[in-house]
Amino acid sequence: MNIFIHPTAEVSPGAEIGDGTKIWNQAQVREDSRIGTDCIISKNVYIDIGVRIGSRVKIQNNVNVYHGVTVEDDVFLGPSMTFTNDLFPRAFNADWEVSETLVKRGASIGAGAVVVCGHTVGEYAMVGAGSVVTKDVPAHALVVGNPARQIGWVCRCGQKLDGEMRCPRCGLVYDELKDKENPQG
């Protein structure tokens, strides 16, 4: 298989790694995790037990993907973003209650963002750098801030849609979004 694992990376023999995936310096991939094909796992990334990562996913430096997280295909996870996995964590509590988180196909999460567990980031949604996601993010939504709030819609190519739900870069029009509230701002 055509997999690259940097000599300083720690990859459990119980992890499943897809063809064409590259795992870089000091990354750790735990047992029972599954990473799809053609992914990039950058420096100092932590992938916990049982995590599922789709194909063509790019995970930037210093990202933590904890138990209970599923990442679908074509997702971008920006530098130093992180996921939580317990709504009521205590260092002394042995009864962790993992809340699952789903990042759907094509979504992008910006640098330094935090996704609080138990939520879904919709297809092709974009979470701005430094945002804190505390509720579900709809497909194609652009959210920013703490807590993250929707300020618009984005195209599959990543550009913010105009008031007519048209992409200024590729020209696609999203008629299905025209019927939804368009929080411009």
Image: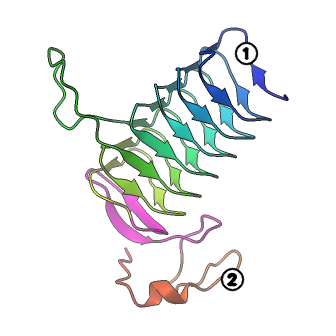
Bin the neighbour count of mark 1 within 10 Å (Cα to Cα): few under 14, some 14-19, many 20 and up: some
Q: Residue at x 54, y 63 (%)?
A: 124
Q: Magenta span covers which residues? A: 138-160
Q: Position of residue 149 (x, y in %)?
A: 30, 62
Where residue 66 sits, quadrant-wise, is top left
Number of numbered discs:
2
Q: Which residue is found at the position 31% from the left and 35% from the top?
A: 85
Where residue 58 appears, as percent x and y from the top left, is 64, 41
- Residue type at mark 2: give it: Gly
Identify whether 170 is placed above or below 92. Answer: below
Q: Is residue 37 visible?
A: yes
Task: Give the CA distance from mark 1 to mark 2.
Answer: 41 Å
Considering depth in this image, is 28 or 59 the residue closer to the camera? 28
Q: Name above or below for residue 185 compared with residue 178.
A: above
* Residue at left offset 60%, top offset 14%: 26
In this rendering, the label closer to the viewer, 1 or 2: 1
Please tell me the numbered disc located at residue 6. Answer: 1
Q: Secondary structure of the magenta portion, mostly?
A: loop
Marks 1 and 2 in Cβ contact (< 8 Å): no
Q: Is residue 90 above or below residue 54?
A: above
Dot 1 lies on which element? Answer: loop
Left or right: residue 153 compared with residue 14: left
Provide the residue designation for mark 2: 171
Check disc 1 and give the amino acid type. His
